[in-house]
Amino acid sequence: MSRRFPILIATLGSLFLLAAAYGFQFMGYPPCHLCWWQRYPHFAAIAIGLLALGIGGRWLPALGALAMVTTAGVGLFHTGVERGWWEGPASCTGTGQSLGSLSGSDLLSTTAAPRVIMCDQVSWEMLGLSMASWNMLASLVLLAFWIRAIQRS
């Protein structure tokens, strides 16, 4: 088996995870800030994978592995925020803005700002794991494929 196969699997895996994320978004599960942070390394991994399929060497698969470590790390952090193990970003956790700080016109406005999606709220889960947790686990599996590609380079 050549090094191209694990690169192809890792690249297609990131593509699948992004497609699933956008599919959930289309079904009415908008992403929070941490969800977006989990997507960016997958975009990078797809670009890296496409380059690595055409170029030899170990440095591109190593960058793909780094992208998977990054998104898995963000997934772990997001899971911890969802489960209350640690604090998340102030911009998307907690109770939100106090109504006392809003004016009467703000409260009656029909052009209100878009709703903030809370990072500490689980919007969907399967088998007791949230989307952030599933992304973390899938990214660790894809990391193994990137590592296999490095070994075969």
Image: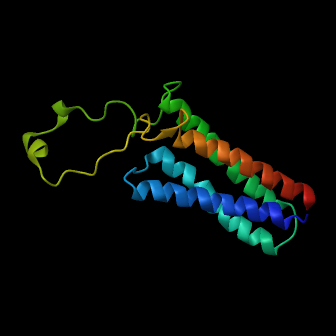
Question: In the rendering, at what x and y percent does residue 84 appear?
Answer: 48, 25
Give the residue furthest to the top. 85
Query: Depth check: 65 or 137 in front?
Result: 137
The image quarter containing residue 4 is bottom right
Residue 90 or 33: which is nearer the viewer? 33
- 18 vs 90, left or right, is right
Residue depicted at x 75% and y 52%: 65
Residue 93 to residue 57: above or below: above
Q: Residue at x 75, y 49 (%)?
A: 143
Q: Position of residue 144 (x, y in %)?
A: 79, 49
Q: How is the image coloured?
A: rainbow
- Give the total of numbered labels: 0
Please give left or right for residue 54 compared with residue 108 in the image: right
84 in relation to 93, above or below: above
Q: Is residue 45 above or below residue 108?
A: below
User: Split into 4 quadrants, where in the image is the C terminus?
Assistant: bottom right
Q: Residue at x 63, y 42 (%)?
A: 136
**What residue sits 42% from the left and 55% below the top?**
25
Residue 60 placement, left or right of 15: right
Residue that protrudes farthest toward the bottom in the picture: 54
Residue 147 x, y percent position in the rendering: 83, 52
Q: Quadrant of residue 151?
A: bottom right
On-image quarter of the N terminus: bottom right
